[in-house]
Image (cartoon, grey):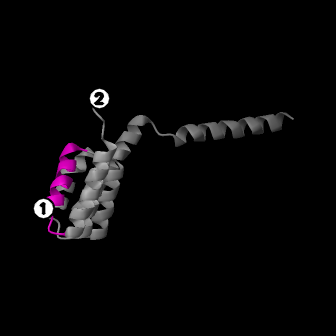
Amino acid sequence: MNSKVALLLLVLLTITSLGLAAEPAKETRLLNKEIVVENYLIGLHSENNGLMSSSAFYLGELRSGEAVIPLMKILKSSDEEELRIAAALALLKIGDERGIYAIKKAIRFDESKRVSDICAKFYNDYLTRNYTPEG
C-alpha cells in the first residue's frame, strides 16, 4: 500500500512540476516576443514575397509598433500589389495613427485600383470600429 501511495505522490509531483515548468516566466515570454518580432522584421526585408507577406501578417497579429515604419514603406513603395495589401492589413491591425494615415493616403495615391479599393475598405472598417457618437 505504501508503494502505491509513494508512486501516486511521485506522479502528482511530476505532473505539478511539469505544469509549472511549461508556463514560462513573464520576462521569458516578453523576450521570446521580442525575438519573434525581430525575426519577422528581418523577414520584411527578404527577397521572398511569400516570406515578406507572412511576416507582415504576423507583425500585424502581434500588433508590433516597431513594424509600422517598415510596413508603411512597403505600402508606399513595393512593386507587388499583394505585398502592399498585406502591409495595409498589418497596419490596420496594429492601429497606429501613422499607419492608418498611410492607408488613407493609399486610397487616393496608389497606382493600383485593386490596392486603393482594398485600402478604402480597410480604412472604412477602421472608422466604423472607432466611431464614437458625440452627444
Find out whether the residues at labels 1 and 2 contact each other: C-beta distance under 8 Å. no
In this rendering, position of residue 94 left or right of residue 15? left
Tell me which amino acid carries mark 2.
Answer: Gly
Q: What stretch is highlighted in magenta?
A: 96-112
Q: Does the magenta stretch include residue 34?
A: no
**How far from the left and from the top, in percent, is residue 110?**
15, 64
In the image shown, does 34 or 67 lie closer to the viewer? Answer: 67
Q: Does the magenta stretch include residue 111?
A: yes
In the image shown, does 111 or 5 lie closer to the viewer? Answer: 111
Q: Give residue 119's quadrant in the image.
A: bottom left
Main SS, magenta region, reads helix
Q: Residue at x 21, y 63 (%)?
A: 116
The CA distance from mark 1 to mark 2 is 35 Å
Residue furthest to the top in view is 135
- Kindly report which numbered mark, 1 or 2, lies closer to the viewer in this rendering: 2
The residue where tag 2 is placed is 135
Q: Which residue is drawn at 24% across and 58% down?
A: 120
The residue where tag 1 is placed is 109
Q: Which residue is drawn at 28% across and 55% down?
A: 122
Residue furthest to the right in view is 1
Q: Is mark 1 on a helix, strand or loop?
A: helix
In this rendering, position of residue 14 left or right of residue 113? right
**How far from the left and from the top, in percent, is residue 7?**
76, 39
Q: Which residue is drawn at 36% across and 40% down?
A: 30
Q: What element carries label 2?
A: loop
